[in-house]
Image: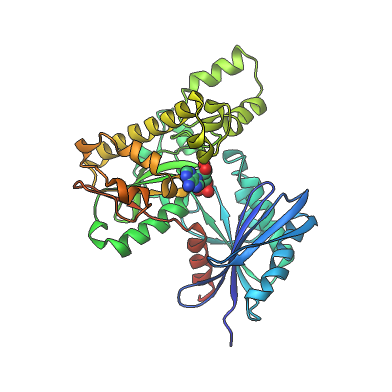
Amino acid sequence: MTPGAILTINAGSSSIKFSIYSAGEEPVERVRGEVEDIGDDAILEIGDHGGEKRRIGIGRVSHEAALTAILDHADDFLDGQAVTGIGHRVVHGGVDFARPVRLDDATIARLVELEPLAPLHQPHNLAAVRAARRAFPDAVQIACFDTAFHRAHPWVNDTFALPREWYDRGVRRYGFHGLSYEYVSGEIARIAPELQHGRVVIAHLGNGASMCAVRDGRSVASTMGFTALDGLPMGTRCGQLDPGVLLYMMDHEKMTSDQITDLLYRKSGLKGLSGMTNDMRELEASDRPEAAEAIDYFVFRIRRELGAMAASQGGIDALVFCGGIGENSALVRRKVCEGMEWLGIAIDETANAENALELATGKTRVMVIRTDEERVIARAVNAALNG
Ligand code: AMP
């Protein structure tokens, strides 16, 4: 019998990133792509692994119709395999979900309760879950959480210094980007097993950005907190902010929570600081001082957190970059590592310019590892399909 296919879905408000794998001992990637501009004139971009992508107009479609279009066009790549499992990236799993879970009505209802904790992501993740259940009622559907990797982190990193009842009510530091950290930790164990028990800091630097201290393949500290706003500045999110600023905005500027949400999630970070764009490539290419200042602020906060994470682990054995910026921006990596000899961090310029796997010339390992959150989801579905 031909093994089934696994569809992974990472849904935003107007986009669905997807990939399709053949199930088996280890999932094999067959197709990758994205539907953009859902709700408007949507475009489906699709191609086989590493190959050239086709761009196809699929008209004004809902999330559900977009999923059906993906499957129609993916047929060419699937050799008749039917989709038997679907894995969804779900940003927030709250206190309860520390591992992937099968999606049923009761689980979805619990995940809906977490929507206020990730307003930019969770509602869209769950809209895609509903659409996929309608479109593929017979497929096994699994949710994989960005918070799950951090659930076992120590209490001091799990709590805020609020009265204890708030902790019990779920106001905790959850941490995000867990699928990326899980993948990269697995790669570290594979490529550099000697680091498995070491003090590792992973910097996931993309449009969303965070850092995570990892020991024995588990999160021990992360820069993100209750929501995906905390920690490093991001493409359009502010990162760490004195909560007094929010009180000032509400009390003095009379801003509503919707206005503040829009400001902190969509108008801040690199975009807000530069007054231009959240795209690091454009910032690097610009000669405007605001662009350089936005990069400087981004780098400054990464360096601060690097020091904090090294201190929280009593040192550092490896710094690993991933995410669109971490994997591709030699400039950001160079600026982060400059003057970091006190942490044993020094990098080779040529290796850095080539985005090489190993950059270090000092005693601390510095690596660039291409993250693959989809593969983590595919593995979870594969495990469920294999019982
Ligand atoms: P991600 O969210 O992981 O897809 O990362 C998106 C970010 O990576 C954007 O800010 C891009 O500008 C940035 N990025 C992608 N390629 C490059 C590159 N070659 N140089 C600098 N930044 C890049």
* Corner quadrant of residue 264: top right
| Residue at 61%, 66% in the rendered image | 47
Give left or right: position of 288 versus 11.
left
- Residue 97 shows in this picture: yes
- Residue 362 placed where, x, y %? 20, 46
Query: Split into 4 quadrants, where in the image is the N terminus?
Result: bottom right
- In the picture provided, is 261 more to the left or to the right than 172? right
- Relative to 129, 159 lies left or right: left
Pick the front one: 18 or 121: 18
Number of numbered discs overlaid on the protein picture: 0
Q: Is residue 75 above or below residue 160?
A: below
Query: Residue 206 at what x, y percent from top left?
Result: 49, 44
User: Quick one: 31 or 10, which is closer to the camera?
Assistant: 31
Question: In front: 34, or 291?
Answer: 291
Residue furthest to the right: 60
Look at the image and tell me whether residue 94 can be seen. Answer: no
Residue 212 pos. (x, y %):
37, 45
Name the one closer to the observer, 381 or 203. 203
Residue drawn where x is 50% and y is 39% of the image: 280
